[in-house]
Image (cartoon, helix red, strand yellow):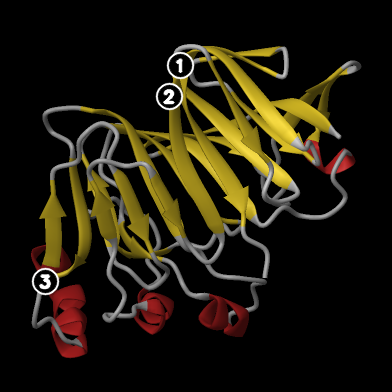
Amino acid sequence: MAIYKLHGYLKKTLWGSENWLLSSNPSITSSIETENGLVNINTVFHEELPVLIKLIEVTDKLSIQVHPNDSTAKSHGYLNGKTESWFILENQADSEILLNFKPLTDNQHIVNSLNNGTIERLCGRYIPSKNNFIHIPSGTIHSILGNLKLLEIQQNSDITYRLYDWNRGRNLDIEKGLESIDISQKGIIIDSFESFESDYYTVKKYSTTDNIILKHHSEFMYFFIIDGELKINDKLFITNESGLSCQESSLNFKGVGTFLIVEFNYE
């Protein structure tokens, strides 16, 4: 039974950066703070956690992309697919999200647009705002244009199939991407976010000017400080810091601040 402060792995990308705050994925692992200093998370937890969480800063366009569902991912040799959600922390005037296909789009439209480099025209366009929550089920087309900072909560998977990359010379994954697209799946945007539950995780937002006591509903509880300064069972966390609670009966958040809680929904 413990509360661990997390230290992410910062990965620079062509389009910005992603800080893997909570990751037991073999490709990149985060670290946790112990009495003996920082240690690899997998030396404490000897099984992969089902959820991966990143702090993402976008300064250029993401590829137009899709992630496979569990079934398709397994047929490609992976353990599971990738459903993800974004909580918007900061947006700029040029921030824009591509999400879902426009109505009446069919598979032939998608193939034609990939052949002539016009898939962007088939995508829905949205202007994100701070504190928006965007849920992107596996199989959903998406991208980010412009500057945006967000917390990404996702299945523990690093599978991305690029369909279009703005002629930047990176490899595309057209065949597997087309196989992964599910036109029936629709991403959703929640403006006044309070909570959301998917098949894989539950996310809730809280604010306090004094203290809040939250009970554990699963073995692990992840928390991210959106703003403020909070003592969590007497361990101090500040803005943009995060932690993982393991097998605690409850957590006491003392201070002034706003934070997210993520609990894992095991099958």
Q: Which mark is drawn over residue 205? A: none
Q: Which mark is drawn over residue 257? A: 1
In the rendered image, residue 35, in percent from the top left (x then y), is placed at 89, 16
Quarter occupied by residue 156: bottom right
For label 3, the crowd category at 10 Å Cα-Cα, with few meaning under 14, some 14 to 19 and many 20 or more, is: few
In the rendered image, residue 152, in percent from the top left (x then y), is placed at 45, 44
Q: Amino acid at mark 2?
A: Ser
Residue at image mark 3: 102
- Asked if residue 154 can be seen in this view, the reply is no
Q: Is residue 84 left or right of residue 91?
A: right
Of the 4 image quadrants, the one containing the C terminus is bottom right
Whether residues under marks 2 and 1 lie with C-beta atoms below 8 angstroms apart, the answer is: yes
Q: Quick one: 26 or 83, which is closer to the camera?
A: 83
Of the 4 image quadrants, the one containing the N terminus is top right
Identity of the residue drawn at 16% across and 86% down: 106
Helix, strand or loop under label 3: loop
